[in-house]
Image (cartoon, helix red, strand yellow):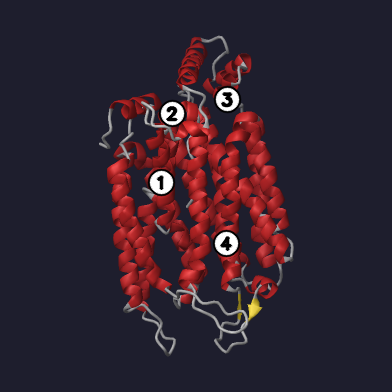
Amino acid sequence: MAGGPGGDGAGVESKSLFWSVVMSAFAAFGGILFGYDTGTIGGIMVMTDWLQLFGIFDTSGENLGWYLPTPDQSLVVSILSAGTFFGALLAYPMGDYIGRKWGIIASCAVFSLGVGLQLDTRWATFIVGRVIAGLGVGLVSCLIPMYQSECSPKHLRGAIVGLYQLAITIGALLAAIVLNATKSRPDHSSWRIPIAVQFVWAAILVIGMLVLPESPRFLLKKGREAAGKSALGRLLTRPVDSPEVTAEFDEIMAALEADRQLGSGSYADCFRNTDGKNGLRTWTGILLQGWQQLTGINFIFYYGTTFFKSAGIKNPFIITIICDVVNTATTIVGTQLIDRVGRRRLLLIGAAGMCICEFIVAIVGVTAGHIQPDHSVNLPAQRVLIAFVCIYIAFFATSWGPVVWVLTGELSPLNIRAKAMSLAVASNWLWNFGIGYATPYLVNPSTTGVLGVKTADLGVKVFFIWGSTCAGCFIFTYFFVPETKGLSLEQIDLLYRESSGTS
């Protein structure tokens, strides 16, 4: 799934357990908001009341019953990602002009407006609501991890930013549970309740931000030294005039001055081949985000319920919950491995594991696992299919899920980090949009009649594509991604300045 990048600094030198807990809890509600929103639409699309309201009834004799035409299915899923694409691009100016803290609060207001519009019973209003909610999600997906990595204790930076990905998976799991609880309701509440629950996550996030300090790096970058020292004092749990606060203040000011001397930090600077290899670092972040989406993970989380239903599985909602439980549990493992095993090694292991699993799913699906002409299914083959989908999710959740977002926040130098991250996250959402829009045309069967649509009708064969792209993930990581385990952000700068290797 999509997540959020790191921030505009290297954290603070704090040993405070209190702030570690606060930042982790904050990550939870920000990530839950994001993960829950992206996890709802897959289940809503197969609810009877929603289909009767927005879908059409099949009169072609193909026994489809109430269904959503492929173009509408593509639109309603992918349009959220179109909003998040622009939200990610707007996160930089919002975060740099009004601040990380108030930027997050404003993002929650935008998101809540989109959620409210999705409660309407008109198709156009529902789609507009998806776009506006996506705009809020895109803003949040950049600003929260940016705030975290600038304010979290240095020794826990990787873990806390990685926990944001864990929170996203918890949000998706909560969405699956709520959807399963309301799916049988006979009225609009079956899909309105899952959507309306999102107001709760936004409200908690706003309340949390109101009691937290602004990022000291943002304040000092804006020349607000007194406010910056005050924020540092709160984060370090020390008096403003204490040696710890003074040392941290001096370190941040020195880093800001060094970056001012490097250049203006414009978008053009992100792609210049400087001594610090800005262009290589920016493109690495952008392409890492693209490859993450090309693993095919969002096929499971956007279309998993629909896919399992079409594969003949009797209770696709339960299988979706199982997938979300696996995703959440293994993400916990993944966040523990980031600073132990290393970023690069985890990406290589994850890409290889996902590639093998997806080819197995594809091969089983096109041989023993397909539905027979008499509509019977091969239960052992179905169990193998479900098992390897879960193993595939486990490989993703321990590697490409959290690691890509940690790397995105680490690879760019401070003077362009906010802009480079917004470009990388926008890349993620652009690929998310493209894959979300194209998938129904790749997977769904063709339909006939006035509203008939010709599709590729790949079904489970789409996993051959995802397996091939995972092989591409392995190759890209091997040649272009350096190991940054145990390095400070300043040492990563030196790595790129003094070496072209990836080891």
Residue 120, image x and y in percent?
Answer: 74, 62
**Which one is in front, 15 or 58?**
58
Work out how far the residue at label 1 is from the one at label 4, CA to CA, in angstroms.
Answer: 23 Å
Nearer to us: label 4 or label 2: 2
Residue occupying the point 60% across, 33% down: 95
Q: Around disc 3, counting alpha carbons within 10 Å, would you say few (fewer than 14), some (14 to 19), or many (20 or more)?
A: many
Reply above or below: 375 against 108.
below
**Residue bearing the label numbered 2:** 413
Does the residue at mark 2 contact the one at mark 1 (Cβ under 8 Å)?
no
Nearer to us: label 3 or label 1: 1
Residue type, numbered disc 4: Val
**Residue bearing the label numbered 4:** 77
**Residue bearing the label numbered 1:** 287
Nearer to us: label 2 or label 3: 2
**Residue bearing the label numbered 3:** 218
Residue type, numbered disc 2: Pro
Residue type, numbered disc 3: Phe
Q: Name which of mark 2 and mark 1 comes first in the sequence.
A: 1
Helix, strand or loop for disc 4: helix
Q: Quadrant of residue 478?
A: top left
Work out how far the residue at label 2 is from the one at label 1, CA to CA, in angstroms.
Answer: 17 Å
Q: Quadrant of residue 502?
A: top left
Work out how far the residue at label 3 is from the one at label 1, CA to CA, in angstroms.
Answer: 27 Å
Q: Name which of mark 3 and mark 1 comes first in the sequence.
A: 3
Looking at the image, residue 400 sits to the left or right of residue 149; the answer is: left
Helix, strand or loop for disc 2: loop
Residue type, numbered disc 1: Leu
Does the residue at mark 4 contact the one at mark 2 (Cβ under 8 Å)?
no
